[in-house]
Structure formats: structure tokens, C-alpha cells
Amino acid sequence: MSRERPECVVVGISDLWTFDDRRSEPHGRLDDAAVALRDGRVCWVGPSSLAPEADAVVDATGTIALPGLIDCHTHSLFAGSRADEFARRLAGATYAEILEAGGGILSSVRATRAASSDTLAATLRARVDDMLTRGVTTVEVKTGYGLDERHELRLLTIIADLRAGPRLVPTLLGAHAVPLEHRGHREAYVDLVVERMIPAAAPLSPHVDVYCDRGAYTLDEARRILQAARDHGLVIKAHAEQIEHTGIARVAAELGAASVDHLERVDAAGLAAMARAGTVAVLLPGARTYLHDPSPPVAAMRAAGVPMAVATDFNPGSSPVRDLLTCATLACLDMGLTIPEALRGITRNAARALARPDLGWLGPGSAGDLALFRPPPGEPARAESLIQYLGGHHAAVVLRDGHVVHRA
């Protein structure tokens, strides 16, 4: 350990999962552990009995500690309500039918375009601050409810200007749906995304996403958009194989995508390409639950060696869910993940899906992001209980970049 004095040390952690793959313990798991932080990063991890002196001490006795949780797929920036759509789906309408009729995503586009930037920023702040209380220190936030150059750039600016709270990772999703005004000449809109939107967004957004599926973009259109983003040096990802199999999982992986998401109908060729590229499969159990979709083929992903992450897909239509730990539980119950897979899926593998190797683990050199939880009443302080008990988990203490940013 460096001779420099840590600024903060967290001591007395009952159950720490570091996901530091350099450690010999499974999942880097330690009992009665401590974490020391300096300059926003972890500088030491080990037994509490050996913890160095520090300027500040956080007493974590009786807590479960994880790396700051990462929600690597959200649509958190939107206006308007889609409660009527929820009722229509309960009555038998499908998600694709509603979208093709001009509802769904397109109804959120109308409301978001009409909302002021101040209103959108305040609403986004409230949503991500709620996620912070649940231990989430990093939130990916997609655009996609502007669907023209001016509004998409406005949404990216709102994300970039939001300070404090969780770390926000903006993603351009200008190809979320084909806007109504371009339904008769969709090629012109793809041209706009490729030739104007991506270059203009590059300084504000490190990532570009595309929705390739029935009612959205074709495989050829999606390939062109992802290729343009890659040519601009941006991280690429795709909404893939959710409603229909399109082949986008294979194409995105071959283009070097950091992640492909949903994957209910992915095939063996798609999984093989993802495994070769190291592309993360982001599982979205909230959307699967709300839309009654089949489960992604988790056993085949595991067998192929595809890393799996879990995210909320928080959005006003198909997954109005802000609780990442609830989604981790659903990923176990409904998709077949193990508890360690689910915990890694909301930490280290979620960081891989965002191309952020400094996040999602705890060890010398990692980001100083830490979430401390009390166990459910009557349960021992073991992380398994955070997955076993469905929902309601709020963090006792959250640190981001080495500083306490939330204390219950």
C-alpha cells in the first residue's frame, strides 16, 4: 500500500463483494473488511484489523458492501405518461402494435418535445436521485425521445449539465423509432442520424445505440448507423432480438459493440459472435415482465461464455421500473441467473457494457464507488439476502468517487 494517508476508510463491513478478479477469494468476497480511499479511488482493501488510519472513517459494522451499482440501460429522460398504453396492453394490445399505430415511444416523443428543458432536467434529477438512494452510483441515460437533431442534442445537453448525484453516462439513441414525420421517407431520417446527428452528438455522448426490431429499424439501417458511430470513435450498442429475430446481435458484435441488450430471440450465431468479441449481453427483466416476453437463453449464453449484465431498462412504457436490485432478483427468478451472476451483472459486467473498466469492482486503482446496505430485518448481513428479498432495498450509505453522497 502507498505510504500516502487515505482520505477515507470504510471499516467493519460484514460482507464485502469486491469483484476484483485479481483476488483468490470467489468474487473477491471478504468478511469483516475495510476499504480505503484516496483521490476518488480505492487505494487499499483488506481486513478491518489492518485498516490504515485516515482523515475520515465510515463505520460500516453490520453492513453488506458492493461496488457502486451500475444501471447500464435506462431511458430516464422523458416527459408524459403512458398509463393508458399499460391499460391497452392489459386488454390485449401488443407493444409493437401500439408503436406501429403511432403510440408507445412516439407518444413519449410528443410529450418530451413539448416539455421545457428545466422541467426535463428537474424530472431527470428526481429519478436518478431516487436510484442513488438504492445504491446506484452510475446510470446510463439514453436520448431517443427527441428524434430530430435539435431535440436529441437538447436531451444530451440536459444529461451533460446535470451535476452531483449518480454519475450519468449519456447515450445517443436518435434511432429509437422512426419519427412520424419521416414515416414516408425513412431513408432521409437515417441519413440525418448518420450525417448530422452522430457527428454533432459526438462531443456530448460517448455511446450510440440503435433499436433494430419490428416497427423500428431494419438490419441494414442499423448496420449503417452503428458503422457511422464506430467511424467517429464512439462506443456502440444495440437493442437486439427483442420482438423478432433480426440478426443484429451478430452484426453489432462483429462491429465491436460493447453490449447488445434484450436478446429474448437471439440465436446461436449471435451468441457466438458476442463471445468472440467480448460483447456483453444486457438482460432487461423489467421489460420481459411487462411485455410477457420469453426469457433470453441464459443457459446458452453461459455455455457460450457471453458475459451477462442486468439493467432496469427504466422507461415510461415497457419497463417503468427504477429498482435495479429488484431487476437482479427477477433475473434470477425468471431468467435463471445465479445470485453471483446477478450481483456481477449489476456491477462489474454492467461496467463492461459501458466500456468503463474502472467501475463495478473494488480494488487498488478502481473508482471509489461503494454501496452499503443493511440486511432485511432478521437476516444476517450476507449479500444473498439482497437478491432473495424482492424490492425495497435502500442503501444505508453510498460513496461516489471516494466521498459520501448519500446517507440514510
Image (cartoon, rainbow, N blue to C red):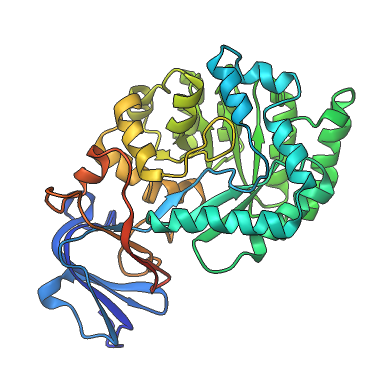
Q: For residue 326, what is the image quadrant?
A: top left
- Viewer-side residue, 334 vs 389: 389
On screen, residue 63 versus residue 289, left or right, reads: left
Q: On the rendered structure, is 321 left or right of 83?
A: left
Horizontal side, residue 275 vs residue 112: left or right: left
* Residue 223 in view in this figure: no
Residue 390 in view, yes or no: yes
Q: Position of residue 365 (x, y in %)?
A: 37, 69
- In the rendered image, the quadrant that contains the N terminus is bottom left
Q: Nearer the viewer, residue 157 or 115?
A: 115
Image quadrant assignment for residue 88:
top right
Point out residue 102 in the picture as x, y percentages from the top left corner.
Answer: 76, 24
Give the residue at x 87% y 31%: 181
On screen, residue 205 above or below 345: below
Residue at point 26%, 41% (across, down): 387
Rendered location of residue 129, percent (x, y): 49, 59
Look at 65% across and 31% down and name the residue there: 211
Q: Give the vertical position of 397 relative to 280 (above or below).
A: below
Asked whether 316 or 61 is in front, the reply is: 316
Q: Quadrant of the C terminus?
A: bottom left
Q: Residue 202, how many percent across, how many down?
A: 73, 55
Report the front residue among 121 and 381.
Answer: 121
Q: How many marks?
A: 0
**Vertical relation: 305 (above or below) 264:** below
Name the residue rendered at 85%, 37% in the picture: 191
